[in-house]
Image (cartoon, coloured by chain):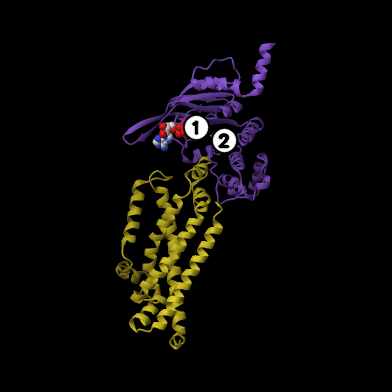
Chain colours: A yellow, B purple
Amino acid sequence: MDSILALKAEIIRAIEQTCAMVSISVSAAVIVGMPIGILLFLTAPGHLRSNRLLYGVLSYIVNLVRSFPFLILLVALIPFSRMIVGTAIGPLAASVSLSVAAIPFYARLVEQSLREVPKGVIEAAVASGAPMKHIIGGVLLSEARPGLVSGLTVTIISFISYSAAAGTVGGGGIGDLAIRYGYQRFDTEVMVACIVILVVIVQLVQWIGSFAASRLDKRK
Amino acid sequence: MITFREVSKQYKAGRQWIEAVQPTSLHVEKGQIQGIIGFSGAGKSTLLRMANLLELPTTGEVYIDGQELTGLNAGELREARRSIGMIFQHYNLLSNETCAANVEFVLKAAGLPSRERKRRVEECLEIVGLADKAKQYPAQLSGGQKQRVAIARALANNPKVLLCDEPTSALDPVTTLSILEFLEKINRELQVTILLVTHEIQVARRLCSRIAVMESGEITERLDMNHPEIKPVTQLGRFLFDSAEMSSSSSVQQKGEGYRG
Ligand SMILES: Nc1ncnc2c1ncn2[C@@H]1O[C@H](COP(=O)(O)OP(=O)(O)OP(=O)(O)O)[C@@H](O)[C@H]1O
Ligand SMILES: [Mg+2]
């Protein structure tokens, strides 16, 4: 207990760092990944803006980034992180790699959720003469709302755990703290405390995510 | 009001091409209710869906109210589609939006300002008798009520034409009748020309002034229901008139009295 109290400030800082890394990467996933997911959906063969070349290229890039083991991606992106944020260590630098990983991750989940929207519903909107921006906003995103939120929940939770991995190469955060104290210094108490914190955060995120998704789902 | 000129539609199925609709012409006058009947796979839906270019004809032209749809660019086609309402067998409503929002969607997409939208949504739900369901979600409604919301949505932009693809095929007979009454009312009071696809003979007979029988991608018979003396030659055509005599009791009685007198 003593060691935890002694490290109180450091634990709080670690929580802040984890939150920062996850917020930045998940924001990137939503801001960049969501449009890519929509584009993937629209350009897929047989869909509204079917474009074999664009779909092929996008899909290939998404697969490519997703097939990298995260740690390797992290190392490979060190020069890129340095270019963007001026440093290769710390939560901000880790956020760059995390964002690069989170964007295609969420893009695929968005594409999948949009595929769940019944074709007939989209067709009814096309038949009514609705322009593309209304079909995207008023039909696709609206009908896929529960799936988009569930996908976001999955993304947040995955990237809490990815951020722990990022922490070990100088990113900071709770995962990093757990490894530094628990694994390297055999301070089990601190490690357990860190794990408990992670478990609580993940449970909380999942609970809020599930609740939001079910509230948004009017299909019954 | 609706003219198909030598339209045809081919699909590629593997290596083969199937001719879903062979070159076909059909003209529907303003204010008419034209039915298309036929067995499954006859090409009814494909023909209907070419009326608003949901399906692009392989050959031929489509005219709505004198305008050639097949010659329009994307923006012009969107504009033209606003005056062509459409309803479907499975309603195709937005399940995460209320009834009012479903109707409002097409008004918003047409660029109507907010205040006018609200007024028009109310009017349209009123027409189909669902003003009290405005705030409900489709999942909370019966099939017939969902189809009425779909009708309200189809009417929102004051269409000249209403396309119906099996609008009652998922409904029980009593609900079917109420939907048909709404369609009749819309045709009569709003002068909307209706093109209706169905495989239900009763529905076609009840509603349509003219009926085209389709078989394997072709219109094989055109019947004017106001001229019952015409002798249909196709099996479906004959069935249309035969079962009219058998199952509709009032017409049987009238005819019986006629014979006696
Ligand atoms: N997108 C498509 N791709 C390939 N073939 C198609 C497609 N749509 C329709 N067809 C084929 O075209 C033919 C006509 O289909 P259509 O849906 O117009 O028939 P229908 O008369 O409406 O039948 P139903 O009563 O079953 O709805 C069928 O043989 C069908 O398999
Ligand atoms: Mg059909």
Residue at numbered disc 2: B168
**Disc 1, ligand 1: is the CB inside 8 Å?**
yes
**Disc 2, ligand 2: is the CB inside 8 Å?**
no
Kind of residue at badge 1:
Leu
The chain letter under disc 2 is B
Residue at numbered disc 1: B48
Kind of residue at badge 2:
Thr
Dot 1 crowding, Cα within 10 Å, few <14, some 14–19, many 20+: many
Given residues A38 and B215, the one toward you in this image is: B215
Assign a secondary structure to mark 2. loop
Q: Residue furthest top?
A: B261
Q: For the point 46% across and 31% down, which residue is it?
A: B40
Q: Are marks 2 and 1 on the same chain?
A: yes
Assign a secondary structure to mark 1. helix
Dot 2 crowding, Cα within 10 Å, few <14, some 14–19, many 20+: many
Q: Position of residue A65 (x, y in %)?
A: 33, 61
Left or right of residue B143: residue A118:
left
Give the position of the N terminus of chain A as an image quadrant. bottom left
Nearer mark to the viewer, of 2 and 1: 2
Q: Is residue A21 visible?
A: yes
